[in-house]
């Protein structure tokens, strides 16, 4: 392979990396809780994609192929005890992938623009739910700290955030407004 | 969200909806710098990978055309990708140009296919202020026009500032016609016009014209409204994927004959506009008074 060819290949792959970076980051966040694991898995997924690019069916979208690699890596690391995935249930993983695929087809110029619809949905959550979600995700507060701040039990806050995430997903996926 | 906070969710039952929302919430609340660091780290790791790729080596026998073929294959990849459309890239570029502050473009024209590009104009812009300096080397003529705080202006043959008529009417015929001119507005207006009167097609990425190692988004705009829009029938854009700024805008397929009837020379076959680096412009750079007599 000529240097020019390899160089052009890397340039093109760099564009693919940049275009799918947000999607892959969000997907990995769905699969593992730890941010540092997300960073490592992001790099590893892109490396594997680069090494296996000749296996990629060009007639298919790049995003699902990338998610497939990411999912296999997470499960592999889980078997080796290196990461703690959010789920190992094949049915849940399949449904999760479908939600990302649905989002990729939704109106919007980029994945990030589509993902940011969740911020509009967040505004429409009941106050007690929105406050809890913002404290956890925007301010990185521990559940116990959120519980103290909102004068609730930690268990109640966990349930509140859990229910809020459910409602937000329904809102993003189906365009339904939270009550 | 911190690792510590994140780990607290371990005990939560994981439904697809919850995990989906968790991924999106984490993404939209993360700082942009962390995303760029992640990408840079992955690209450095890829750069360290020094192995030939079968995906690309399958074109080994076509060494001279290999890069072109790869680019073609990637066009197929992008055709199926819904991540970023030609319109989206152009819109992002338009926003980037508006946010770029001061910028300079150089325009070269090519009279005949294969002929040397000749410097035709330097276009400077700062927000809505614009300065056009056109050159006609064979006639040793420079023409000035622009837009300052008072509005559009041009210099007449005696170098006096004229704000009464269409200052751009004095510019070379190939710069525009009627209500459609790509030099009567700043370069960003060109991109806005692209969306209105042209069909935008995303092509395979190409190397940056001046910075080896940087691939550019490539957009081709094919005119769809014969009597509207800009003068050129086809406009090609090279857009930096990082800065989103148009690095090169190439105009071609000009209608022939119309300027001959006006007694002007025929249009060039191609006009190439490149973004170039420039020192900060002086404060009065865009004022008509700097260039002409009252």
Image (cartoon, rainbow, N blue to C red):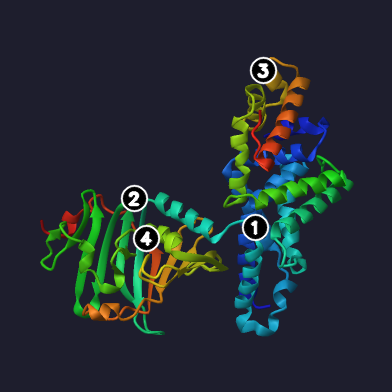
- Establish whether labels 2 and 1 are both on one chain: no
Give the secondary structure at mark 4: helix
What residue sits 75% from the left and 17% below the top?
A153
Q: Is residue A175 left or right of residue B97?
A: right
Q: CA distance from mark 2 to mark 3?
A: 47 Å
Per the image, the residue denoted by label 2 is B127
Where, by quadrant of the figure, is residue B24 drawn? top right
Q: Residue A108 placed where, x, y %?
A: 58, 50
Residue B6, placed above or below residue B35 = above
Q: What crowding class fits label 4: few (fewer than 14 Cα within 10 Å), some (14-19), or many (20 or more)?
A: many
Closest to the observer, B278 or B107: B107
Give the secondary structure at mark 2: loop
Q: CA distance from mark 1 to mark 3?
A: 41 Å
Q: Residue A145 placed where, x, y %?
A: 69, 21
Residue A150, label in figure: 3
Using the rendered image of the protein, determine whether residue B261 is visible from the camera's viewpoint.
Answer: yes
Q: CA distance from mark 4 to mark 1?
A: 29 Å
Per the image, the residue denoted by label 4 is B187
Residue A81, placed above or below residue B156 = above
Tag 3 subunit: A
Query: In the image, which is nearer the foreground, mark 4 or mark 1?
Result: 4
Residue A17, label in figure: 1
Q: CA distance from mark 2 to mark 1?
A: 32 Å
Tag 4 subunit: B
Marks 1/3 in contact by CB < 8 Å: the verdict is no
Q: What crowding class fits label 3: few (fewer than 14 Cα within 10 Å), some (14-19), or many (20 or more)?
A: some
- Establish whether labels 4 and 1 are both on one chain: no
């Amino acid at each position: 392979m000529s240097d020019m060819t390899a160089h052009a290949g890397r340039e093109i792959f760099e564009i693919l990396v940049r275009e799918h970076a947000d999607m892959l980051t969000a997907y990995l966040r769905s699969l593992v809780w730890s941010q540092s694991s997300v960073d490592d898995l992001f790099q590893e997924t892109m490396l594997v994609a680069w090494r296996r690019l000749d296996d990629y069916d060009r007639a298919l979208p790049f995003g699902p192929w990338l998610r497939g690699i990411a999912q296999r890596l997470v499960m592999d690391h889980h078997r080796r005890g290196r990461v703690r995935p959010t789920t190992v249930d094949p049915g849940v993983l399949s449904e999760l992938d479908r939600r990302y695929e649905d989002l990729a087809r939704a109106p919007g110029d980029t994945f990030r623009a589509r993902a940011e619809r969740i911020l509009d949905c967040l505004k429409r959550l009941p106050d007690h739910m929105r406050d809890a979600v913002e404290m956890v995700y925007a301010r990185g507060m521990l559940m116990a700290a959120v519980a103290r701040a909102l004068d609730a039990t930690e268990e109640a806050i966990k349930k509140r955030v859990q229910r809020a995430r459910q409602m937000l997903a329904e809102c993003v996926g189906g365009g339904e407004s939270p009550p | 969200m911190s690792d510590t906070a994140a780990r607290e969710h371990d005990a939560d039952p994981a439904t697809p909806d919850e995990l989906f929302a968790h991924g999106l919430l984490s993404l939209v609340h993360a700082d942009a710098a962390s995303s760029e660091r992640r990408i840079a780290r992955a690209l450095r790791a890829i750069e360290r990978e020094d192995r030939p790729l079968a995906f690309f080596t399958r074109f080994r026998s076509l060494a001279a055309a290999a890069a072109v073929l790869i680019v073609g294959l990637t066009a197929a990849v992008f055709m199926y990708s819904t991540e970023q459309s030609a319109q989206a890239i152009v819109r992002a570029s338009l926003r980037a140009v508006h946010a770029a502050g001061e910028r300079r473009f150089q325009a070269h024209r090519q009279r005949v296919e294969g002929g040397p590009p000749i410097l035709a104009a330097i276009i400077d812009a700062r927000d809505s202020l614009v300065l056009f300096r056109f050159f006609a080397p064979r006639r040793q003529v420079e023409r000035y026009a622009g837009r300052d705080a008072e509005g559009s202006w041009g210099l007449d043959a005696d170098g006096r500032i004229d704000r009464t008529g269409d200052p751009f009417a004095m510019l070379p015929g190939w710069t525009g016609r009627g209500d459609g001119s790509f030099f009567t507005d700043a370069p960003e207006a060109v991109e806005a016009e692209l969306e209105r009167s042209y069909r935008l097609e995303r092509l395979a990425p190409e190397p940056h014209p001046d910075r080896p190692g940087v691939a550019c988004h490539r957009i081709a705009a094919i005119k769809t409204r014969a009597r509207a829009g800009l003068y050129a029938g086809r406009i090609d854009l090279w857009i930096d994927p990082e800065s989103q700024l148009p690095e090169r805008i190439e105009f071609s397929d000009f209608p022939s004959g119309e300027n001959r009837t006006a007694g002007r020379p025929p249009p060039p076959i191609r006009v190439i506009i490149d973004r170039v680096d420039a020192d900060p412009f002086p404060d009065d750079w865009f004022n008509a008074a700097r260039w002409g007599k009252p």
